[in-house]
Amino acid sequence: MANPSTLADAPSTKPSITHVIFDMDGLLLDTEKFYTEVQEMILSRYNKTFDWSLKAKMMGKKAIVAARIFVEETGISDSLSAEDFLVEREDMLCKLFPTSELMPGVSRLIQHLHAKGIPIAVGTGSMRRHFELKTQRHGEVFSLMHHIVTGDDPEVKQGKPSPDLFLAVAKRFEGGPVDSQKILVFEDAPSGVLAAKNAGMSVVMVPDPRLDSSFHETADQVLSSLLDFNPTEWGLPPFDSNS
Ligand SMILES: O=P(O)(O)OC[C@H](O)CO
Ligand SMILES: [Mg+2]
């Protein structure tokens, strides 16, 4: 759906949703900026700049896959291996992760779905130890999740855009596996949107405005912010008038 404004006029053909899965980086937490910042810093040493076409290829993917893309596409692989890039990035990222902030609308939506008894979970490409650092100030929100599956989970053989992660999340809901057609995924990354579609799920994309709009095409709905989400369009309970 390239143009969100046309959605309002389209007849509602959305499936009724019973379960919701949230991506984490760039969707629940404003952590994509840390990866961007650190990668810009590393590239500047080679007199190169980091741009959003490269960012789009990396985001949401497993660390080593994204690292290979980074060193190869920027032409620095002879000077810096993907493995060394990850070691260098790690120190800087781990200092930034504990300062992570929630994206707009996250608390309201999570608290609403939880209060209405809609099972919610997280599916993140992030490793467990990074997840712990990123969420240490946000226990209130993340404790409402039924479960959390991270990218280094043994069941996740391949990262996004493979469906492995979201299928593993679907399996671990009460009475799982839940039928993919009843699951709505929230994602910010092109690889994550594809992973959700490859898993047979519906997907609401909340992309960074700097991401090229051609990446919106695969999503079932595109929103500028979680604050714009209307649960009733997906058969989910409406927000209370005071929320
Ligand atoms: O967007 P997530 O939560 O799958 O995380 C992916 C990486 O850790 C960052 O791009
Ligand atoms: Mg993400």
Image (cartoon, helix red, strand yellow):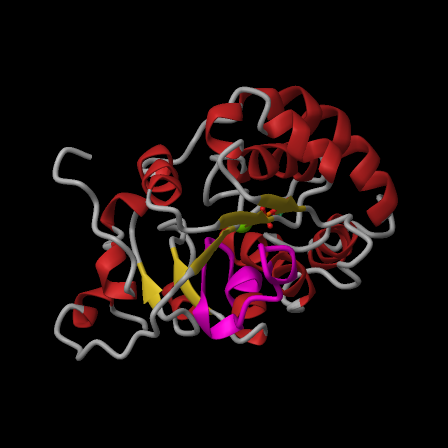
Q: At 46% across and 45% down in the image, what residue appears?
A: 27
What residue is rendered at 23% in x and 49% in y? Answer: 228
Q: Position of residue 219 (x, y in %)?
A: 41, 69
Side of 127 relative to 1 (left or right): right
* Image height of 12 relative to 51, above or below: below
Q: Nearer the viewer, residue 54 or 223?
A: 223
Residue 34, position as x, y percentages in the image: 57, 32
> In the rendered structure, does residue 187 fall within the stretch colored magenta?
yes
Q: Considering depth in this image, is 52 or 219 the residue closer to the camera?
A: 219
Residue at 77%, 48% (x, y): give it: 152
Q: Quadrant of residue 3?
A: bottom left
- Residues rendered magenta in the picture: 170-193
Residue 167 shows up from this direction: yes
Q: Specify the quadrant that holds the C terminus.
A: top left
Looking at the picture, tell me which residue is in the foreground, 56 or 125.
125
Query: Most extreme residue toward the front, as rendered?
Result: 175
Tell me: 213 left or right of 230.
right
Q: Which residue is painted at 69% across and 33% down in the image? A: 130
Where is 141 relative to 186, above or below?
A: above
Q: Is residue 224 magenta?
A: no
Q: Is residue 97 left or right of residue 202?
A: right
